């Protein structure tokens, strides 16, 4: 399994780090087989798995459940689990307990939390104090969707960009080993990456971060909305739908099941 030291070495050598979100056993198995460096069990499962409009309805129990499944499928891959909405907002003690739950019960190797306010910096310090590797997340933080008024590019203005850089520096000082940058201008993402010693992972942040992450479902056309930053490699939704239609027609036409699909058929005739 690749670990934090190996990931840091990749940054030092300017080797790009690969990350994919995954939420179930078989997807995780395929991601590991493909040689992806990191799996993120993201609270984006609220939309692509639970069918919600945003990530806010995801619970810590949801993340534990899906992290367990991902760990079974990818036993040798570094796994980061999201701290969902309200699992780290109340106090440091609750943040520590929920982070530990993702590690001990879920089988994650690290936890990620959104935001860079002073209280969030304290939460990162608390997590690190528990010997749990922490990952920060700045830019478009989906748990703040109501505050932002939608899924929009962040830190486009100079003052906002300066604020994000300062928060990134504080996240590094707090002890995080990685920072996810989402939906920000490419120039800003490069500035942050050049400024920090810790790893930066981009999602809609351009070409100059230390690595990239995308949602598994977005790669394969298995989501309702395709962000600008997501590259669709194949439209599995169309392929699956067409084959479901073939199956349904075979059943209606009594072409399925055929003899080879039957245990102890009543007759030997076709």
Image (tube, grey):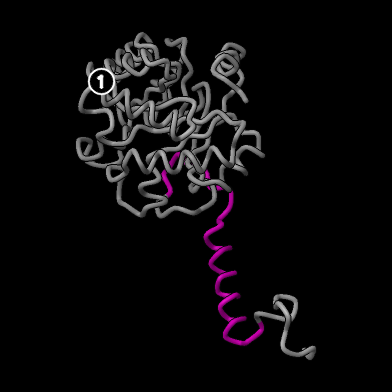
Q: Quadrant of the N terminus?
A: top right
Q: Is residue 149 magenta?
A: no
Vertical placement of residue 110 versus 238, above or below: above
Most distant residue in the right direction: 268
Which residue is painted at 72% across and 88% down in the image? 266
Q: Quadrant of the C terminus?
A: bottom right
Which residue is painted at 39% across and 33% down in the image? 82
Residue 30 is situated, as x and y percent measured from the top left of the image, at 62, 44
Which residue is painted at 58% across and 63% down in the image? 239
Looking at the rendered structure, the secondary structure element under dot 1 is helix
Front-most of 186 and 201? Answer: 201
The answer, for residue 253, to whether it is visible in the render is yes
The answer to which quarter of the image holds residue 159 is top left
Which residues, given as a range, are shown in magenta?
226-255
Asked whether, in this view, residue 184 is left or right of residue 197, the answer is: left
Vertical placement of residue 78 versus 117, above or below: below
Front-most of 3 and 117? Answer: 3
Front-most of 72 and 8? Answer: 72
Asked whether, in this view, residue 20 is left or right of residue 50, the answer is: right
Vertical placement of residue 125 versus 137, above or below: above
Residue 53 is situated, as x and y percent measured from the top left of the image, at 30, 51
The answer to which quarter of the image holds residue 75 is top right
């Amino acid at each position: 399994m690749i670990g934090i030291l190996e990931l840091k070495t990749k940054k030092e050598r300017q080797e790009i780090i690969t990350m994919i979100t995954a939420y179930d056993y078989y997807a995780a198995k395929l991601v590991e087989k493909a040689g992806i460096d990191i799996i993120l069990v993201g609270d984006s499962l609220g939309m692509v798995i639970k069918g919600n409009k945003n990530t806010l309805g995801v619970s810590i129990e949801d993340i534990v459940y899906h992290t367990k499944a991902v760990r079974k499928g990818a036993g040798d891959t570094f796994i980061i689990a999201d701290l969902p909405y309200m699992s780290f907002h109340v106090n440091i003690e609750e943040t520590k307990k929920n982070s530990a739950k993702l590690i001990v019960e879920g089988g994650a190797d690290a936890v990620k939390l959104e935001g860079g306010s002073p209280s969030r910096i304290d939460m990162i310090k608390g997590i690190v104090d528990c010997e749990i590797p922490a990952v920060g997340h700045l830019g478009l933080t989906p748990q703040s969707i109501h505050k932002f008024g939608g899924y929009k590019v962040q830190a486009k203005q100079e003052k906002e960009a300066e604020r994000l850089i300062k928060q990134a520096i504080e996240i590094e000082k707090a002890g995080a080993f990685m920072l996810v940058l989402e939906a920000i201008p490419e120039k800003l993402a490069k500035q942050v990456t050049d400024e920090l010693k810790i790893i930066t992972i981009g999602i809609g942040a351009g070409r100059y971060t230390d690595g990239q992450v995308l949602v598994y479902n977005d790669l394969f056309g298995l989501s309702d909305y395709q962000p600008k930053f997501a590259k669709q490699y194949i439209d599995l939704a169309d392929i699956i739908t067409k084959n479901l239609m073939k199956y349904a027609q075979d059943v209606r036409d009594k072409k399925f099941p055929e003899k080879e699909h039957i245990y102890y058929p009543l007759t030997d005739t076709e």
